[in-house]
Amino acid sequence: AGRVLARKWRRPAIEMFPTFASGDRFLFSRAIGERFAADIDPGHPALVEYFAWLTELLSVHDLADVSVEDFLAPADESNLVFLPWEFQLANEGFDDRHTFVGPCLAGPEPDIWSPPGTDPVALVSLGTTSNHHPDFFRQCAAAFEDLPWHVVCTHGGGVEPGELGRLPRNVEVHRWLPHTAVLPYASVFVSQAGMGSVMQALHFGVPQVMVPYLPEQQFIAERAVELGLGLAVRKENISPSVLRDAVLATARDETVRAAVRDMRGHIKAAGGTARAADVVEARLRTGLAMAHMR
């Protein structure tokens, strides 16, 4: 819809990438397609219907002269990417049309949550798209039952509380709790490797144990491991002992902590909200100049 309106009203646009960016030399959707080609049927009725609908959409809005290929180009003239350049895949292939501002987060929220004691804290979440896995949360609870850790689980409404069964005393469960309230106290973040979760953890300097469920999350977890920011565990291999070993190994690994500190520095240098606002304002000035010319 954004691209349709920008072209229809002849306004400058900014594309926003909440996950890995795409450009002329790297297309994230292509990378996913190549990895999971065996699982994708190009003749699937849903794909056929999508391209037919897209062609009709362009025609209805007087953009019939715009080809589908051009309309689906990987980037616009101005692009905001909400991760640091150092985390981006194939980052050498991007020019100044892409501004890597990192995550745009508010500060910590200490008044919402604080640890009940002095034990190290583990935050556990599967985000908002992969959270329909009560067995995952049960196994996380079992992993910490006999450990001097305090565990905060946020299930995002993907499971019913009754599905989690009996929980150890050192495990608290919330439908949702701002991660920015817990991460300042956390020693490890166990997540599904969604980009939002990964960036939040790095923003606060927290190492990670990642259990990806979706193709995009697999790429994110692999990149994080490649950069030494934590460990990844295949969802097929999840068990209390595997989770416990991964969390303890990550928490005590000074090499991981050093890499996380470095990436946290890159995130701070990226500029976050203020730099993103600068890009938007610069684009707005371009639009005003174009309007005066017309």
Image (spheres, rainbow, N blue to C red):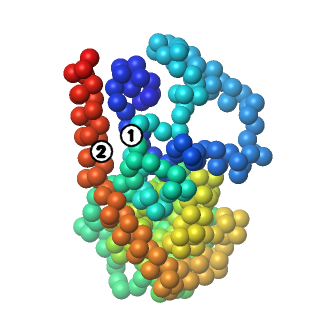
Residue 78: mark in rendering: 1
Q: Nearer the viewer, residue 13 or 164?
A: 13
Question: Residue furthest toward the right?
Answer: 38
Seen from the viewer's position, the closer of residues 34 and 106 is 34
Q: Quadrant of residue 138?
A: bottom right
Label 1 with label 2: CB-CB less than 8 Å: yes
Earlier in the chain: of badge 1 and badge 2, it is 1
Task: Note whether residue 173 is visible.
Answer: no
* In the image: residue 53, left or right of residue 40: left
User: Visible in this render: residue 43?
Assistant: yes
Relative to 129, does residue 154 appear above or below in the rendering?
Answer: below
The quarter of the picture where the N terminus appears is top left
Neighbour tally class for label 1: few under 14, some 14-19, many 20 plus, Cα within 10 Å: some
Residue 166 in percent (x, y) is at 55, 71
- Is residue 211 depicted above or below 241 in this figure? above
Residue in the image at 53% along x and 80% along y:
250
Q: Point out which mark residue 206 bears.
A: none
For image coordinates 53% across by 39% down, the residue present is: 74
The kind of residue tagged 1 is: Ser
Pointer 2 residue: 279
Q: Residue at x 54, y 66 (%)?
A: 224
Residue 265 as seen in the image, left or right of residue 148: left
Q: Position of residue 118 (x, y in %)?
A: 36, 86
Closest to the observer, 148 or 106 = 106
Residue plotted at (34% across, 59% down): 270
User: Crowding near pointer 2: few (<14 within 10 Å), some, many (20+)?
Assistant: some
Q: Quadrant of the C terminus?
A: top left
Q: Position of residue 123 (x, y in %)?
A: 45, 70
Amino acid residing under circle 2: Val
| Label 1 element class | loop
Taking depth in this image into account, of 175 and 233 the one nearest to the observer is 233
